[in-house]
Image: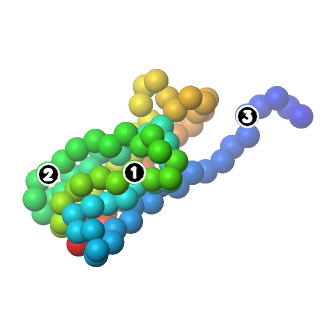
Amino acid sequence: MTGLPSSGYSYLTATTDPDTPGVTRLGPYTGVHVHWRNISTGAAGVAYLDNRYGTSVVTGSGTVVASVTIPPDGPGYRILVATPGAGVWTVP
């Protein structure tokens, strides 16, 4: 054992459901900010994910873009390297 921390990857997903139009479910992940913008309507916001089962966000219907950042106070564990992430999806 070297005593060095292990590495790992975490993926954040964005899912939608035609039965709940205008809503995106983000997760499963905790301790990150998702900065989103609906480029069809101009609506925007920041969601702090604090539920490991996923967080529902009212983005409105249309094309949504987002990026993920780690807040300055961090998610409660040491992060040596973080690669920024981004995505685009359509919300019914």
Q: CA distance from mark 2 to mark 3?
A: 40 Å
Q: On screen, 75 above or below 12? A: above
Q: On screen, 44 above or below 79? A: below
- Asked which quadrant contains residue 17, the reply is bottom left
Which element is circle 2 on? loop
Residue type at the position of mark 2 = Ala
The residue positioned 45% from the left and 40% from the top of the image is: 50
Q: Earlier in the sequence, mark 2 or mark 3?
A: 3
Q: Is residue 75 left or right of residue 59?
A: right
Q: Residue furthest left?
A: 41
Q: Earlier in the sequence, mark 3 or mark 1?
A: 3
Instruction: Tell me the residue that label 1 is attached to.
Output: 55
Q: On screen, 91 above or below 45? A: below
Instruction: Tell me the residue that label 2 is attached to.
Output: 43
Residue type at the position of mark 1 = Thr
Q: From the viewer's perspective, is the residue at label 3 or at label 1 nearer?
A: 1
Q: CA distance from mark 3 to mark 1?
A: 28 Å
Q: From the viewer's perspective, is the residue at label 1 or at label 2 nearer?
A: 1
Number of residues whose C-alpha sits closer than 10 Å to that of mark 3, classed few (under 14), some (14–19) or many (20 or more) = few
Residue type at the position of mark 3 = Pro
